[in-house]
Image (cartoon, helix red, strand yellow):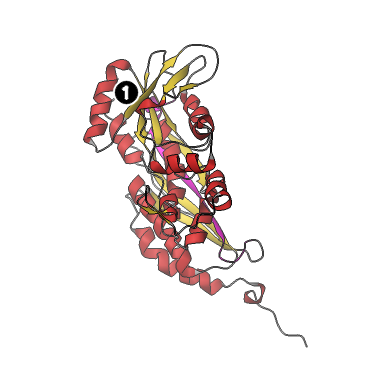
Amino acid sequence: MSDKLTYKDSGVDIHAGYETVRLIKDYVKKTYTKGVMSDIGGFGGMFGIDKNEYEEPVLVSGTDGVGTKLMIAFKTDVHDTIGEDAVAMCVNDVICQGAKPLFFLDYIATGKLDPRKAADIVKGVANGCIKAGAALIGGETAEMPGLYGEGEYDIAGFCVGIVDRKKIIDGSKIVEGDVLIGIPSSGFHSNGYSLVRKVFFDHKNYNADDYVEELGCTLGEALLTPTKIYPKLILDLISKFEIKGMSNITGGGFYENIPRMFPEGITADIETKNINVLPVFKLLQREGNVDIDEMYSTFNMGIGMVLAVSKDTKDDVMEYLKNQGEEPVVIGYTSRREGGLKICHN
């Protein structure tokens, strides 16, 4: 008689899954807000909405991943920030409609589950949820031998936010002459890493642990800087001022993302002279001999979120952001003309 086979013989260890749940339980519970109605381990995450808080509640959802930034985590064997990126990529989208993030779910897939590595990833997710004010109410860890290489994994996330219908920010009030204010990013965020990797590792043969004087840290540390999480700042801001539109500067850089908030017939003229381009962008451009327009069509260049406000509101919004420890800059003005976004590099 042939030997009996088990699921573990195929490469899937369900006990590693049990151990992962044990390790992440405390991280997850730290994210719980008053709306959470379920505990870790259920088939579905439940979240109750306070009906007295909203007149006409609208749910806003977003989903995203981290992209090839994951490959920097593989190179450095640092995994406790990548989950924060997954959260940021979702909550920074839903806040653009004025929606408060309510809850988040993650999905982690790997070839062979390492409970401690998975716990590090979820620790990052939990930290991101706390920064965003969202509860981590569910997730999935999938072990799929043969699909991923040794030590490799992928992570994606899903966020749901809420906003009163009358308070939705959809850009419809933007008119010619409105001011565009940029709020700084923390670095590359989670975009453009295919080009980042090609320049630094394929073209220039850097190692992730190389110390780079102008960055003040190793290259790997700079590239793994977590994506900045904006919702708490923005929610406070929109409770005090009229913000006509918002754009999260993700993949596609300025050229693709800023126009997404404009109504038909409105575009903008951008001047980059006020932007504090972070050293890591300057290093990449120089080492890769990347054209300036290519940089602005791929990366955030140091501006992670763009707000559209009226001229009358601009000074107050700028002062408020500065009082919150931010360094906002005016990056341009809206206009009514034919053609797309124009960027002037002075």
Task: Note whether 11 is above or below 45 in the view shown.
Answer: below
In this rendering, position of residue 343 left or right of residue 148: left
Say few, some or many: other residues with alpha carbon within 10 Å of mark 1 (under 14 / 14 to 19 / 20 or more): some
Task: Note whether 174 is above or below 279 in the view shown.
Answer: above
Q: Quadrant of the C terminus?
A: top left
Residue 245, percent across and down? 40, 25
Secondary structure found at label 1: loop
| Residue ranking furthest to the left | 323
Dividing the picture into quadrants, the one containing residue 92 is top left
Q: Is residue 57 visible?
A: no
Residue in the picture at 44% in, 55% down = 220
In this rendering, position of residue 180 left or right of residue 70: left
In this rendering, position of residue 332 left or right of residue 2: left
| Residue ranking furthest to the bottom | 1
Which of the pair 312/37 is nearer the observer? Answer: 312
Residue 151, percent across and down? 55, 65
Residue 315, percent across and down? 25, 22
Question: How many discs appear?
Answer: 1
Q: Amino acid at mark 1?
A: Glu
Q: Which residue is mark 1?
A: 242
Which of the pair 200/235 is nearer the observer? Answer: 200
Residue 212, percent across and down? 40, 52
Q: Is residue 165 visible?
A: yes
In the image, which residues are magenta?
148-170
Residue 169 belongs to the span the image colors magenta? yes
Which of the pair 300/140 is nearer the observer? Answer: 300
Residue in the picture at 54% in, 55% down = 71
Residue 96 belongs to the span the image colors magenta? no
In this rendering, position of residue 45 left or right of residue 231: right
Task: Note whether 65 is above or below 245 in the view shown.
Answer: below
Q: Quadrant of the N terminus?
A: bottom right
